[in-house]
Amino acid sequence: MSSEEVANGYQKVGVIGAGAAGLVAARELKREGLEVAVYEQKADVGGLWLYDSGVGEDPLGLDPKRVGPNHGTIYQSLRTNLPREVMGFMDYPFLVKEDSRDPRGFPSHQEVFLYLKDFARDFNLLELIRFNTRVEYVGIVNRGPQCVMNGEQVFDMDGDFFNERIQWVVRSRSSFAADSQVEEEIFDAVVVCNGHYRQPKIAEVPGLQKWPGNQIHSMNYRVYEPFYNQVKYLDEDGTVVFNDGSSVIADSIIHCTGYSYSFPFLDTNGIVTVDNNRVGPLYEHIFPPQLAPSLSFVGIPQKIITFPFFELQSKWIASILARKTMLPSRRDMMKSVKELYDYQEMIGLPKHFTHEIDEREAFEHSNQLADRTGSSCFEEWRKEITKATLKCIHSNPTTFRDSWSYCDTLELLKEKTTMDN
């Protein structure tokens, strides 16, 4: 792509977050010749996978605008729940390193972090990232038609501006100093990759606020020792009563109730909202029709093969911003979103499950993403190992990582794929 072609499109793109989604988004945007700046509030890449033994002063994580160090959400003994071969990006395999940092098929969080660090280094992404920088505000700063002919604005058949130009202002400051100077920069497009494991959901249980014991959300759980052998005697104070009438004496409650999508920095004038954990409206869980393609999200769907799925989403976003592929009209995108919502309502799916994609849908959706850019999708062996892993998890949820040897099956599947091709 020539510099003139890029200049007429979306030349400068801001990426929020340097976890797996942000890194692969930055790589795909860079590959298309776009100017990329990545904002990361931590001191290193990895996002969720950058472990920190510290916990915040807010044990339930109720303040969405909390500042100070972001301690992450993973615990010390965490290991992956998919084999490393399945997790890796499609063109950057998650292989066992010669130094055997962690050779296990289901490795520790540290091994995943090091893999992402290798990815950032090998694709020269570190130079794009502004570490220790917290994004405080992202909002529309300029909006108007990008295409003008003979002094007249050009509209599409639906009455929308043809390739409407929207620009965004990003305001940021140091992650560790609330009074640090605010920096401001203008972008042609913004890709939001801040993840969805930051704002905890807390169960609404009567009496929760008055309960005398300790409470934390699982985001602040790191090691088991503080909770080991705590109960020394039984007392009526601190009783937890369940719906079936049973009760236990407890000293602590750990809320393992998941997370809410949260974008406290994002101002779209009410166009994009989070309603009962539905982020919308989003076309294909990525583009808000009224702001597309200048605003996009990577990593909203859940229950997917995360890294390669992020890769496919990022390829599509980059292809559109580079003017290699086109989105449907706003009207058609909104129609698609409405059809999804109507279908989910018809089958009785609660709104907060909008972005959960089951196994079959995940593979179909991935194929559709790949088709949009003419890129390759998940290999058959990756799909089959994923299916086998899920079966093993369901039948042996606590020990599947060490009790199941998938390597022989993997090699046979790879050999079959090679012969079929």
Image (spheres, helix red, strand yellow):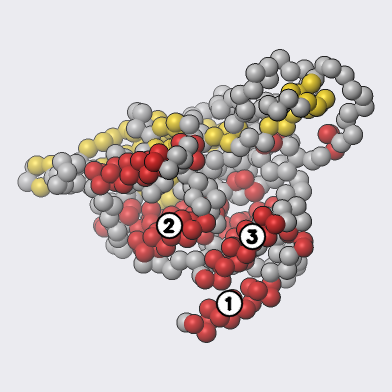
* Mark drawn on residue 414: 1
Q: Which residue is mark 2?
A: 365
Q: Amino acid at mark 1?
A: Lys
The residue at the point 41 percent across, 46 percent down is: 285
The residue at the point 69 percent across, 43 percent down is: 74
Can you give x and y, in whole percent of width and height, for residue 381 in the image?
56, 71
Tell me whether the residue at label 1 lies in contact with that at label 3, contact meaning CB atoms closer than 8 angstroms.
no
Q: Distance of mark 2 from mark 3, alpha carbons? A: 21 Å
Q: Quadrant of residue 195?
A: top right
- Mark 3 Cα shell of 10 Å, populated few (<14), some (14-19), many (≥20): few
Disc nearest the viewer among 2 and 3: 3
- Mark 2 Cα shell of 10 Å, populated few (<14), some (14-19), many (≥20): some
Position of residue 302 in the picture relative to residue 156 (left or right): right
* Residue 232 in view: yes
Q: Amino acid at mark 2?
A: His
First in residue order: circle 2 vs circle 3: 2
Q: Amino acid at mark 3?
A: Lys
Residue extending farthest to the top is 210
First in residue order: circle 2 vs circle 1: 2
